[in-house]
């Protein structure tokens, strides 16, 4: 795999890693983390898939351990870790508000970018109450969804041997589903509404395994994607530029800063 140069970022957002589950692309994430340098790393939920572990058999190999070791290496290098539990690591929400030796655990946070934009950081499962009907997983069932992910792994194993770039079969099939696209539109709107109600400039979330970085009526919607289908992360550069990166460091989408930076405005994340 071609790794991106080790450029230091101001902040990085990762979610939906699903460590311990069969379909986690732990090797790709471990490589990405090895090339990563940042001042703050947000782990935006579903990092360890406690739901999968409880319902199915634990899948934990050398690559999963490499991810844990890479996170420890980030901490030793001076990166601040902020953990925002999601629905698949929900039990960790009992630790919200604590400053543990290795990280801060928050139910949600407000991240202030270098150019002064204030972004709500949440996993996103709190929007299920208004978006869950009509979702792809409800239509075709978990059984078929996980077999799509298995097919995705087999397909990309073949593509890798042929020297071809990673491609998400599951994401492609979802993009062909009108019900899935309508669900995503509802989810994006729910996230934007949550940010606007708080008087913020946008939202960073995960949960739906669909990476995105857009601006709608002056409000930012950033979904950092996942490491099951998308293999993406959101990064903030030192001037406040937001970038959606692929696992190989390619820029998939970008939003420029709002204004020239006068002084760095990073603050300790607080409860929103």
Image: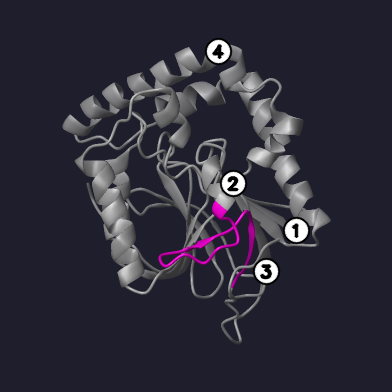
Q: Is residue 250 visible?
A: yes
Q: Earlier in the sequence, mark 1 or mark 2?
A: 2
| Disc number lying in front (1 or 3) | 3
Taking the image as drawn, is residue 162 in sight?
no
Q: Which mark is residue 254?
A: none
Q: In this view, which residue lies farthest toward the left?
A: 161
The mark found on residue 117 in the picture is 3
Gap in angstroms between the C-alphas marked 4 and 1:
35 Å
Picture coordinates of residue 100 (x, y %)? 47, 64
| Magenta region | 95-113
Question: At x 49% / y 75%, what residue is drawn?
Answer: 238
Task: Give the residue at x 46% y 13%.
Answer: 144
Callout 2 environment at 10 Å: few (<14), some (14 to 19), or many (20+)? many
What's the distance in space between the residues labelled 4 and 2, CA to CA? 24 Å
- The residue closer to the viewer here, 150 or 128, is 128
**Circles 3 and 4: CB atoms closer than 8 Å:** no
CA distance separating discs 1 and 2: 22 Å
Q: Indicate the secondary structure of the residue bearing disc 3.
A: loop
Circles 2, 3 touching at the beta carbon (< 8 Å): no
Instruction: Report which residue position mark 2 lands on.
Output: 123
Residue 256 within the magenta-colored segment of the rendering: no
Q: Residue at x 74, y 41 (%)?
A: 189
As helix, strand or loop, the secondary structure at mark 2 comes to: loop
**Residue most toward the front?**
94
CA distance for labels 2 and 3: 19 Å
């Amino acid at each position: 795999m071609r790794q991106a140069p080790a450029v230091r970022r101001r902040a990085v957002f990762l979610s939906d890693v699903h460590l311990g589950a069969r379909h986690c692309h732990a090797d790709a994430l471990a490589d990405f983390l090895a090339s990563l340098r940042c001042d703050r790393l947000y782990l935006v939920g579903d990092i360890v898939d406690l739901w999968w572990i409880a319902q199915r058999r634990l899948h934990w190999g050398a690559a999963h351990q490499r991810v844990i070791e890479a996170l420890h290496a980030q901490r030793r290098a001076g990166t601040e870790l902020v953990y925002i539990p999601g629905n698949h690591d929900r039990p960790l929400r009992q630790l919200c508000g604590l400053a543990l030796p290795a990280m801060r655990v928050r139910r949600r946070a407000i991240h202030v970018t270098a150019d002064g934009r204030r972004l709500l950081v949440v996993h996103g499962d709190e929007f299920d109450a208004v978006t869950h009907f009509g979702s792809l997983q409800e239509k075709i069932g978990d059984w078929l969804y996980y077999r799509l992910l298995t097919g995705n792994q087999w397909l990309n194993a073949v593509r890798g041997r042929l020297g071809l770039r990673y491609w998400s079969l599951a994401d492609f099939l979802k993009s062909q589903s009108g019900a899935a696209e309508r669900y995503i539109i509802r989810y994006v709107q729910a996230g934007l509404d949550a940010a606007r109600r708080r008087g913020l400039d946008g939202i960073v979330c995960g949960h739906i395994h669909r990476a995105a970085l857009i601006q709608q009526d002056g409000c930012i919607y950033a979904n950092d994607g996942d490491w099951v289908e998308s293999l993406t992360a959101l990064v903030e550069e030192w001037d406040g530029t937001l970038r959606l990166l692929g696992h190989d460091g390619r820029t998939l989408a970008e939003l420029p800063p709002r204004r020239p930076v006068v002084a760095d405005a990073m603050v300790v994340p607080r409860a929103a």
